[in-house]
Image: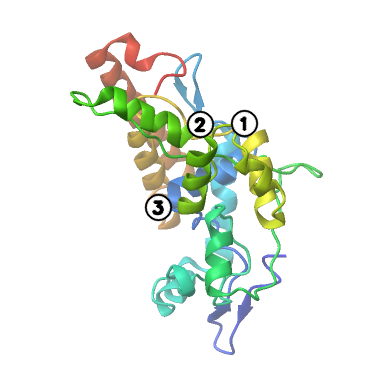
Amino acid sequence: MAEKLTKMDSRGDLETIGLIPWSVYGSENSLFTWGWCFGGEFYNPETREITCDSPQILAALKWMLSYAEKFGIVKITAFIQSQQGFGTGPLDPFLTGKVAFLAVHVSVVRLYAKYKPDLDYGLAPLPGLNEGEEGNGSWVGGWCIGIPKGSKHRREAFEFMKWLCTSDQGTRSSYETSGSFPGYTKAPVLEDIAREPKKAIFLDILKKTRHQRPVMPAQAYYMGAIRRAVDYSLNNLKTPEEALKEARELTEKELHRVEQQFGEASAGKGSS
């Protein structure tokens, strides 16, 4: 479907592209998304193994690269640049009709309602590798709130955190202000969200998904290594195999360094 919705002009330049697989909120988030769609995992918390060069992740990266090979990375880059780099808000490439499919965050529902309220569009779970599978590539992120070390108002800060994260008024205020869902499963505002068709699909993802970015001390480093691996592959600086192997090896070294510096507690299974 994405390929059929890709249109070229008489000179062979892109007018509209069906999908840009590496544009899911950055190269690293793109590989997380499609890697899970292909049935891969990026980290084993039990063995503390980095697994970004597994066969499934490699297959996902090669699939992403197939778009660059089919339509030309130079042509796609020129196409993006011709649209001033694809903007946000009213310049979102989906709103301007330049990209037919996007893997998106729930925030787009509010965005599209603001800038193009009459837009007729649909939402569906990401497909899986096998026929009939869906939602395998869906995952959750989130925002955290904490109390700084040395705070002089720890009790008051904790009361505010409880209000914001668990009370009806706080969770509703957080949702109405940010557009993001509260993580508290008993928040009454979730019942309101469930009655909004365009947002209910994201609520279903929140309840059912089993994926999130790897929870371990070198997560930020790992994301940078994955980003470089995708970019190296796209620009033919390394083969996908070489790029993912390097990302694994470098992240393993960084994870080992952190464990050595801060001890076993920093690498605790499931700790962040």
Q: Is residue 28 left or right of residue 125?
A: left
Residues at marks 1 and 2, CA–CA distance in whole angstroms: 8 Å
The residue that disc 1 covers is: 186
Q: Which mark is residue 166?
A: 2
State yes or no: discs 1 and 2 in contact (Cβ < 8 Å).
Answer: yes
* 2 or 3: tag closer to the N-terminus: 2
Q: Position of residue 146 (x, y in %)?
A: 33, 30
Tell us which disc is closer to us: 2 or 3. Answer: 2
Question: Callout 3: helix, strand or loop?
Answer: helix
For residue 239, say whether it is visible.
no
**Residue beneath the point at 59% across and 35% down:** 187
- Marks 2 and 3 in Cβ contact (< 8 Å): no
Residue closest to the eye, 255 or 232: 255
**Residue drawn 53% across the image and 81% down it:** 13
Instruction: Give the residue at mark 3.
Output: 231
**Of the residues under marks 1 and 2, which one precedes in the sequence?**
2
Q: Nearer the viewer, residue 49 or 265?
A: 265
Query: Does 137 sit above or below residue 196?
Result: above
The crowd level at tag 2 (other Cα within 10 Å; few <14, some 14-19, many 20+) is some
Q: Amino acid at mark 1?
A: Lys
- Badge 1 local density, few (<14 within 10 Å), some, or many (20+)? few
247 above or below 61?
Answer: above
- Secondary structure of the residue carrying numbered label 2: helix
CA distance separating discs 1 and 3: 41 Å
